[in-house]
Image: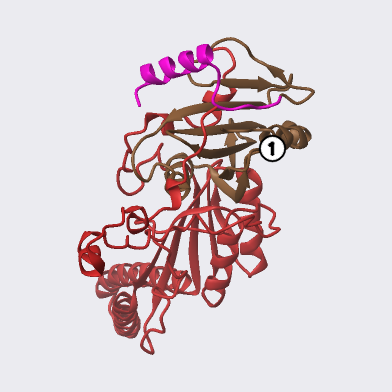
Amino acid sequence: MSPLRVAMLALVLAACGRPFDVKTAPGFLELKEASAHFAYRATTPEGVVVGVRVVDVEGEGSHDLGFWTRAMTLELRDAGGYALVETRDVKSRDGVPGKQLRFGHDESGKPYVYWVTFFAADDHLIVAEAGGSKAHFEAAQSSVEWMLASLAVR
Amino acid sequence: MASMTASAGATPAAAAPATDDGDARLAQDVAPAPPPPPKRQIDRGPAQKAEPDAHPVDKSLPVDANGQPQNATAAATETPPPGTLLVYTAHVTMAVYQVDSAIDAVESIARGVGGYLAARNDTEVRVRVPRARFDEALHKVEASGDVIHRDIAAEDVTDAYVDTEARLKNARAVRDRLQALLEKASVKEAIDIQRELERVTGEIEVLEGKLASLENRVAYSTIDVAFQARGSVALHESPVKLPFPWLGELGLPRLLDLQGAQ
Protein backbone atom coordinates (compact mmCIF):
# COMPACT_ATOMS: atom_id res chain seq x y z
CA MET A 1 0.00 0.00 0.00
CA SER A 2 1.40 3.38 -0.97
CA PRO A 3 2.10 6.06 1.64
CA LEU A 4 -0.60 8.17 0.01
CA ARG A 5 -3.11 5.38 0.44
CA VAL A 6 -2.02 4.92 4.04
CA ALA A 7 -2.55 8.61 4.65
CA MET A 8 -5.96 8.52 2.96
CA LEU A 9 -6.94 5.47 4.98
CA ALA A 10 -5.87 7.20 8.17
CA LEU A 11 -7.97 10.25 7.27
CA VAL A 12 -10.97 8.12 6.37
CA LEU A 13 -10.64 6.21 9.61
CA ALA A 14 -10.39 9.48 11.51
CA ALA A 15 -13.51 10.70 9.79
CA CYS A 16 -15.53 7.50 10.01
CA GLY A 17 -14.30 6.21 13.33
CA ARG A 18 -11.59 3.74 14.06
CA PRO A 19 -12.08 0.03 13.48
CA PHE A 20 -10.64 -0.53 16.92
CA ASP A 21 -10.93 0.75 20.43
CA VAL A 22 -8.08 1.39 22.82
CA LYS A 23 -7.90 2.95 26.25
CA THR A 24 -5.30 5.50 27.23
CA ALA A 25 -3.59 4.64 30.49
CA PRO A 26 -3.03 7.27 33.17
CA GLY A 27 0.33 8.86 32.59
CA PHE A 28 -0.11 8.79 28.82
CA LEU A 29 -1.45 11.62 26.68
CA GLU A 30 -3.32 10.80 23.50
CA LEU A 31 -2.06 12.83 20.55
CA LYS A 32 -5.12 14.06 18.72
CA GLU A 33 -3.39 15.56 15.71
CA ALA A 34 -3.89 13.63 12.51
CA SER A 35 -1.01 11.33 11.65
CA ALA A 36 -0.26 9.89 8.24
CA HIS A 37 0.79 6.64 9.81
CA PHE A 38 -1.03 6.15 13.06
CA ALA A 39 -4.74 6.12 13.77
CA TYR A 40 -3.94 6.45 17.43
CA ARG A 41 -0.88 7.47 19.33
CA ALA A 42 -0.19 8.30 22.94
CA THR A 43 2.97 9.18 24.79
CA THR A 44 4.35 9.62 28.25
CA PRO A 45 6.37 12.73 29.08
CA GLU A 46 9.49 10.54 28.87
CA GLY A 47 8.71 9.47 25.32
CA VAL A 48 7.31 5.99 25.80
CA VAL A 49 4.90 5.81 22.89
CA VAL A 50 2.01 3.52 22.02
CA GLY A 51 0.73 3.80 18.47
CA VAL A 52 -1.90 1.91 16.53
CA ARG A 53 -2.03 1.76 12.77
CA VAL A 54 -4.64 0.18 10.53
CA VAL A 55 -3.28 -1.58 7.50
CA ASP A 56 -5.48 -2.52 4.60
CA VAL A 57 -4.83 -6.12 3.55
CA GLU A 58 -6.82 -8.22 1.17
CA GLY A 59 -6.70 -11.64 -0.32
CA GLU A 60 -6.52 -15.20 0.77
CA GLY A 61 -3.97 -15.69 3.48
CA SER A 62 -4.13 -12.12 4.71
CA HIS A 63 -5.26 -13.38 8.13
CA ASP A 64 -2.30 -15.70 8.43
CA LEU A 65 -0.62 -14.45 11.59
CA GLY A 66 2.36 -16.67 10.89
CA PHE A 67 2.95 -14.90 7.58
CA TRP A 68 2.91 -11.46 9.16
CA THR A 69 5.02 -12.66 12.08
CA ARG A 70 7.67 -13.86 9.66
CA ALA A 71 7.41 -10.77 7.45
CA MET A 72 7.78 -8.37 10.37
CA THR A 73 10.61 -10.41 11.84
CA LEU A 74 12.50 -10.40 8.55
CA GLU A 75 12.03 -6.65 8.25
CA LEU A 76 12.95 -5.72 11.80
CA ARG A 77 15.32 -8.44 12.92
CA ASP A 78 17.07 -9.72 9.85
CA ALA A 79 17.19 -6.43 7.95
CA GLY A 80 16.96 -3.91 10.77
CA GLY A 81 19.15 -5.57 13.37
CA TYR A 82 16.44 -5.61 16.05
CA ALA A 83 16.88 -8.41 18.58
CA LEU A 84 13.81 -10.60 18.88
CA VAL A 85 13.58 -11.10 22.60
CA GLU A 86 10.25 -12.90 22.82
CA THR A 87 7.23 -13.94 20.80
CA ARG A 88 3.82 -14.23 22.43
CA ASP A 89 0.37 -15.35 21.43
CA VAL A 90 -2.12 -12.73 22.57
CA LYS A 91 -5.83 -11.98 22.30
CA SER A 92 -7.56 -8.67 21.88
CA ARG A 93 -10.06 -7.51 24.46
CA ASP A 94 -12.81 -8.86 22.21
CA GLY A 95 -11.17 -12.25 21.79
CA VAL A 96 -9.40 -11.98 18.44
CA PRO A 97 -6.13 -13.93 18.44
CA GLY A 98 -2.99 -12.02 17.61
CA LYS A 99 0.75 -12.02 18.00
CA GLN A 100 3.14 -9.92 19.99
CA LEU A 101 6.78 -9.59 19.02
CA ARG A 102 9.05 -8.08 21.63
CA PHE A 103 12.22 -6.57 20.25
CA GLY A 104 15.20 -4.74 21.63
CA HIS A 105 17.41 -2.35 19.71
CA ASP A 106 20.14 0.13 20.44
CA GLU A 107 19.53 3.68 19.27
CA SER A 108 22.54 6.00 19.46
CA GLY A 109 24.23 3.43 21.65
CA LYS A 110 21.40 3.21 24.18
CA PRO A 111 19.06 0.23 24.57
CA TYR A 112 15.44 0.66 23.53
CA VAL A 113 12.44 -1.64 23.74
CA TYR A 114 10.03 -2.06 20.85
CA TRP A 115 6.91 -4.24 20.82
CA VAL A 116 4.67 -4.97 17.86
CA THR A 117 1.27 -6.48 18.55
CA PHE A 118 -1.06 -7.26 15.68
CA PHE A 119 -4.47 -8.72 14.95
CA ALA A 120 -6.19 -9.65 11.71
CA ALA A 121 -9.76 -8.43 11.42
CA ASP A 122 -11.77 -8.37 8.21
CA ASP A 123 -9.71 -6.78 5.45
CA HIS A 124 -7.19 -5.07 7.64
CA LEU A 125 -4.53 -5.62 10.22
CA ILE A 126 -4.55 -3.71 13.47
CA VAL A 127 -0.92 -3.12 14.33
CA ALA A 128 -0.10 -1.72 17.76
CA GLU A 129 3.44 -0.55 18.39
CA ALA A 130 4.97 0.39 21.71
CA GLY A 131 8.46 1.61 22.32
CA GLY A 132 10.80 3.77 24.29
CA SER A 133 14.15 3.79 25.98
CA LYS A 134 14.60 0.62 28.00
CA ALA A 135 14.66 2.33 31.37
CA HIS A 136 11.56 4.44 30.71
CA PHE A 137 9.75 1.64 28.96
CA GLU A 138 10.26 -0.75 31.84
CA ALA A 139 8.95 1.91 34.22
CA ALA A 140 5.82 2.26 32.10
CA GLN A 141 5.54 -1.40 31.06
CA SER A 142 2.49 -2.22 33.17
CA SER A 143 0.64 0.74 31.64
CA VAL A 144 1.70 -0.30 28.14
CA GLU A 145 0.48 -3.84 28.77
CA TRP A 146 -2.79 -2.46 30.13
CA MET A 147 -3.31 -0.35 27.01
CA LEU A 148 -2.53 -3.25 24.70
CA ALA A 149 -4.89 -5.49 26.66
CA SER A 150 -7.61 -2.85 26.24
CA LEU A 151 -7.37 -3.03 22.47
CA ALA A 152 -10.59 -4.26 20.83
CA VAL A 153 -10.39 -4.81 17.10
CA ARG A 154 -13.90 -5.54 15.82
CA MET B 1 -17.05 -2.04 14.05
CA ALA B 2 -16.63 -4.85 11.60
CA SER B 3 -16.54 -8.43 12.74
CA MET B 4 -13.69 -10.76 12.02
CA THR B 5 -14.36 -13.42 9.42
CA ALA B 6 -13.73 -17.09 10.11
CA SER B 7 -11.80 -17.72 6.94
CA ALA B 8 -8.41 -17.69 8.53
CA GLY B 9 -8.49 -21.35 9.49
CA ALA B 10 -10.79 -22.64 6.74
CA THR B 11 -9.24 -24.96 4.17
CA PRO B 12 -10.34 -24.85 0.53
CA ALA B 13 -11.83 -28.32 0.98
CA ALA B 14 -13.83 -27.28 3.96
CA ALA B 15 -15.01 -24.12 2.26
CA ALA B 16 -16.08 -25.83 -0.99
CA PRO B 17 -19.85 -26.08 -1.56
CA ALA B 18 -21.48 -29.53 -1.33
CA THR B 19 -22.84 -31.09 -4.55
CA ASP B 20 -25.61 -33.62 -5.25
CA ASP B 21 -23.61 -35.84 -7.61
CA GLY B 22 -22.18 -38.28 -5.16
CA ASP B 23 -18.81 -38.95 -3.77
CA ALA B 24 -17.02 -39.41 -7.13
CA ARG B 25 -18.09 -35.97 -8.38
CA LEU B 26 -17.35 -34.52 -4.99
CA ALA B 27 -13.89 -35.99 -5.10
CA GLN B 28 -13.27 -34.24 -8.45
CA ASP B 29 -14.75 -30.89 -7.51
CA VAL B 30 -13.40 -30.45 -4.09
CA ALA B 31 -10.09 -28.69 -4.08
CA PRO B 32 -7.23 -30.72 -2.75
CA ALA B 33 -6.25 -30.21 0.81
CA PRO B 34 -3.69 -27.46 1.10
CA PRO B 35 -0.12 -28.39 1.77
CA PRO B 36 1.19 -27.74 5.22
CA PRO B 37 2.43 -24.21 5.61
CA PRO B 38 6.13 -23.63 5.19
CA LYS B 39 8.06 -24.23 8.36
CA ARG B 40 8.55 -21.01 10.20
CA GLN B 41 11.21 -20.64 12.77
CA ILE B 42 9.59 -17.74 14.54
CA ASP B 43 6.09 -18.98 15.23
CA ARG B 44 6.61 -21.39 18.08
CA GLY B 45 3.48 -21.14 20.12
CA PRO B 46 2.42 -19.16 23.11
CA ALA B 47 4.58 -17.32 25.56
CA GLN B 48 7.96 -18.58 24.47
CA LYS B 49 9.67 -17.02 27.43
CA ALA B 50 13.31 -16.52 26.76
CA GLU B 51 15.93 -18.12 28.92
CA PRO B 52 17.15 -15.88 31.71
CA ASP B 53 20.32 -14.85 29.96
CA ALA B 54 22.06 -11.58 30.57
CA HIS B 55 20.78 -10.63 27.12
CA PRO B 56 17.71 -12.83 26.64
CA VAL B 57 16.48 -13.37 23.13
CA ASP B 58 14.00 -15.50 21.28
CA LYS B 59 15.83 -18.73 20.52
CA SER B 60 14.03 -19.46 17.26
CA LEU B 61 17.05 -18.63 15.24
CA PRO B 62 17.24 -18.84 11.46
CA VAL B 63 20.86 -18.19 11.45
CA ASP B 64 22.43 -19.04 8.14
CA ALA B 65 22.47 -17.00 4.97
CA ASN B 66 19.30 -18.68 3.72
CA GLY B 67 17.43 -18.26 6.94
CA GLN B 68 17.65 -21.98 7.64
CA PRO B 69 18.50 -23.46 10.99
CA GLN B 70 22.02 -24.61 11.18
CA ASN B 71 23.62 -27.14 13.48
CA ALA B 72 26.18 -25.05 15.28
CA THR B 73 29.58 -26.40 14.45
CA ALA B 74 28.87 -29.95 13.43
CA ALA B 75 29.66 -29.52 9.76
CA ALA B 76 32.79 -27.52 10.37
CA THR B 77 34.23 -29.52 13.23
CA GLU B 78 33.81 -33.09 12.12
CA THR B 79 36.78 -35.11 13.20
CA PRO B 80 39.53 -34.55 10.63
CA PRO B 81 41.99 -37.26 9.57
CA PRO B 82 44.83 -37.74 12.07
CA GLY B 83 47.60 -35.23 11.56
CA THR B 84 45.34 -32.71 9.88
CA LEU B 85 45.88 -29.19 11.12
CA LEU B 86 42.76 -27.05 10.98
CA VAL B 87 42.27 -23.39 11.77
CA TYR B 88 38.72 -22.65 12.90
CA THR B 89 37.15 -19.24 12.44
CA ALA B 90 33.58 -18.26 13.28
CA HIS B 91 31.92 -15.06 12.10
CA VAL B 92 28.76 -14.25 14.01
CA THR B 93 26.40 -11.38 13.24
CA MET B 94 24.17 -10.41 16.12
CA ALA B 95 21.25 -8.03 16.52
CA VAL B 96 22.02 -4.53 17.71
CA TYR B 97 20.79 -4.55 21.29
CA GLN B 98 22.72 -3.75 24.44
CA VAL B 99 25.89 -3.95 22.43
CA ASP B 100 28.29 -2.77 25.12
CA SER B 101 27.22 -5.43 27.59
CA ALA B 102 27.07 -8.03 24.82
CA ILE B 103 30.67 -7.30 23.82
CA ASP B 104 31.68 -7.53 27.47
CA ALA B 105 29.90 -10.86 27.66
CA VAL B 106 31.75 -12.21 24.61
CA GLU B 107 35.06 -11.14 26.08
CA SER B 108 34.18 -12.71 29.42
CA ILE B 109 33.20 -15.98 27.73
CA ALA B 110 36.54 -16.09 25.94
CA ARG B 111 38.50 -15.50 29.11
CA GLY B 112 36.37 -18.10 30.89
CA VAL B 113 37.51 -20.82 28.51
CA GLY B 114 41.15 -19.79 28.60
CA GLY B 115 41.04 -17.47 25.62
CA TYR B 116 41.77 -13.80 25.18
CA LEU B 117 40.54 -10.61 23.57
CA ALA B 118 42.18 -9.97 20.20
CA ALA B 119 40.38 -6.76 19.19
CA ARG B 120 37.24 -4.76 19.89
CA ASN B 121 35.55 -1.55 18.88
CA ASP B 122 32.05 -0.13 19.34
CA THR B 123 30.33 -2.71 17.16
CA GLU B 124 32.71 -5.63 16.79
CA VAL B 125 34.76 -7.92 18.97
CA ARG B 126 37.30 -10.61 18.11
CA VAL B 127 38.29 -13.23 20.63
CA ARG B 128 40.56 -16.26 20.41
CA VAL B 129 39.82 -19.39 22.34
CA PRO B 130 41.62 -22.71 22.76
CA ARG B 131 40.70 -25.06 19.95
CA ALA B 132 39.50 -27.71 22.40
CA ARG B 133 36.89 -25.29 23.79
CA PHE B 134 35.88 -23.61 20.54
CA ASP B 135 32.46 -25.30 20.37
CA GLU B 136 31.72 -24.51 23.99
CA ALA B 137 32.72 -20.89 23.61
CA LEU B 138 30.76 -20.46 20.38
CA HIS B 139 27.60 -21.88 21.93
CA LYS B 140 27.93 -19.53 24.87
CA VAL B 141 28.49 -16.56 22.60
CA GLU B 142 25.43 -17.43 20.55
CA ALA B 143 23.35 -17.84 23.70
CA SER B 144 24.32 -14.36 24.84
CA GLY B 145 22.43 -12.53 22.09
CA ASP B 146 20.19 -12.77 19.05
CA VAL B 147 22.24 -14.39 16.29
CA ILE B 148 21.17 -13.20 12.86
CA HIS B 149 23.86 -14.94 10.87
CA ARG B 150 26.68 -17.36 11.54
CA ASP B 151 29.49 -18.57 9.35
CA ILE B 152 32.05 -21.14 10.47
CA ALA B 153 35.11 -21.99 8.42
CA ALA B 154 37.82 -24.59 8.88
CA GLU B 155 41.03 -23.89 6.98
CA ASP B 156 43.34 -26.84 6.42
CA VAL B 157 46.91 -25.61 6.98
CA THR B 158 48.53 -29.03 7.05
CA ASP B 159 50.35 -28.55 3.74
CA ALA B 160 51.56 -25.09 4.71
CA TYR B 161 52.78 -26.39 8.04
CA VAL B 162 54.58 -29.41 6.58
CA ASP B 163 56.15 -27.27 3.85
CA THR B 164 57.31 -24.63 6.31
CA GLU B 165 58.62 -27.28 8.66
CA ALA B 166 60.63 -28.91 5.82
CA ARG B 167 62.03 -25.57 4.65
CA LEU B 168 63.02 -24.77 8.21
CA LYS B 169 64.74 -28.11 8.62
CA ASN B 170 66.68 -27.54 5.39
CA ALA B 171 67.60 -23.99 6.36
CA ARG B 172 68.91 -25.16 9.72
CA ALA B 173 70.96 -27.87 7.98
CA VAL B 174 72.45 -25.24 5.63
CA ARG B 175 73.24 -23.01 8.60
CA ASP B 176 75.00 -25.89 10.36
CA ARG B 177 77.06 -26.65 7.25
CA LEU B 178 77.96 -22.99 6.84
CA GLN B 179 79.05 -22.77 10.45
CA ALA B 180 81.21 -25.85 9.95
CA LEU B 181 82.74 -24.32 6.82
CA LEU B 182 83.31 -21.04 8.59
CA GLU B 183 85.60 -22.71 11.10
CA LYS B 184 87.92 -23.88 8.30
CA ALA B 185 87.59 -20.93 5.95
CA SER B 186 90.18 -18.34 5.04
CA VAL B 187 89.50 -14.71 5.81
CA LYS B 188 88.27 -14.00 2.29
CA GLU B 189 86.05 -17.09 2.29
CA ALA B 190 84.81 -16.29 5.79
CA ILE B 191 83.39 -12.97 4.62
CA ASP B 192 81.29 -14.68 1.96
CA ILE B 193 80.24 -17.48 4.30
CA GLN B 194 79.32 -14.96 6.99
CA ARG B 195 77.14 -13.07 4.54
CA GLU B 196 75.39 -16.29 3.49
CA LEU B 197 75.03 -17.31 7.13
CA GLU B 198 73.24 -14.06 7.91
CA ARG B 199 70.86 -14.63 5.03
CA VAL B 200 70.09 -18.18 6.12
CA THR B 201 69.71 -17.14 9.75
CA GLY B 202 67.19 -14.49 8.65
CA GLU B 203 65.31 -17.07 6.62
CA ILE B 204 65.24 -19.41 9.64
CA GLU B 205 63.76 -16.65 11.81
CA VAL B 206 61.07 -15.96 9.25
CA LEU B 207 60.21 -19.63 8.94
CA GLU B 208 60.19 -20.10 12.71
CA GLY B 209 57.82 -17.15 13.01
CA LYS B 210 55.57 -18.57 10.33
CA LEU B 211 55.54 -21.95 12.03
CA ALA B 212 54.75 -20.40 15.41
CA SER B 213 51.95 -18.39 13.81
CA LEU B 214 50.46 -21.51 12.25
CA GLU B 215 50.71 -23.37 15.53
CA ASN B 216 48.98 -20.49 17.31
CA ARG B 217 46.23 -20.33 14.71
CA VAL B 218 45.65 -24.06 15.10
CA ALA B 219 45.79 -23.95 18.89
CA TYR B 220 43.50 -20.93 19.18
CA SER B 221 40.31 -20.57 17.17
CA THR B 222 38.94 -17.16 16.28
CA ILE B 223 35.44 -15.93 16.97
CA ASP B 224 34.46 -12.65 15.34
CA VAL B 225 31.22 -11.09 16.53
CA ALA B 226 29.70 -8.11 14.74
CA PHE B 227 26.66 -6.22 15.95
CA GLN B 228 25.05 -4.70 12.91
CA ALA B 229 21.85 -4.43 10.96
CA ARG B 230 21.78 -6.36 7.77
CA GLY B 231 20.08 -3.44 6.12
CA SER B 232 22.97 -1.10 6.78
CA VAL B 233 25.67 -3.44 5.57
CA ALA B 234 25.03 -5.87 2.75
CA LEU B 235 26.23 -9.04 4.40
CA HIS B 236 25.03 -11.68 2.02
CA GLU B 237 22.35 -10.93 -0.46
CA SER B 238 19.73 -8.27 -0.95
CA PRO B 239 16.71 -9.03 1.21
CA VAL B 240 13.43 -9.62 -0.56
CA LYS B 241 11.15 -6.59 -0.42
CA LEU B 242 7.50 -7.51 0.00
CA PRO B 243 4.92 -5.20 -1.61
CA PHE B 244 3.84 -3.82 1.76
CA PRO B 245 5.59 -0.48 2.31
CA TRP B 246 4.15 -0.19 5.79
CA LEU B 247 6.43 -3.03 6.87
CA GLY B 248 9.35 -0.72 6.17
CA GLU B 249 7.73 1.94 8.35
CA LEU B 250 7.77 -0.28 11.42
CA GLY B 251 10.38 0.47 14.02
CA LEU B 252 11.34 2.95 16.65
CA PRO B 253 12.23 6.02 14.54
CA ARG B 254 8.73 6.41 13.08
CA LEU B 255 6.93 5.53 16.32
CA LEU B 256 8.94 7.85 18.50
CA ASP B 257 9.03 10.80 16.11
CA LEU B 258 6.22 12.77 17.71
CA GLN B 259 6.70 15.90 15.65
CA GLY B 260 7.96 14.98 12.22
CA ALA B 261 5.34 12.34 11.48
CA GLN B 262 2.33 14.49 12.22
In the rendered structure, which segment of residues is drawn in magenta? A1-23
Residue at the image point whose x is 69% and y is 37% from the top: A149
Q: Is residue A6 magenta?
A: yes
Badge count: 1
Instruction: Give coordinates of residue B141: x percent, y percent.
Output: 58, 60
Q: Which chain is red?
A: B
Is residue B119 magenta-colored?
A: no
Q: Colour of chain A?
A: brown
Residue lying at 54% horizontally and 66% vertically, measured from the top left: B138
Q: Which residue is mark 1?
A: A149
Determine which quarter of the picture holds residue B44: bottom right
User: Circle 1: is it few (<14), some (14-19), or many (20+) Cα within 10 Å?
Assistant: some
Q: Is residue B215 left or right of residue B55?
A: left
Give how far across and how far down residue B218 sits, in percent: 45, 73
Give the dominant element type of the magenta stretch: helix, strand or loop: helix
Q: Position of residue A30 (x, y in %)?
A: 68, 17
Chain hosting mark 1: A
Q: Residue at x 41, y 80 (%)?
A: B78
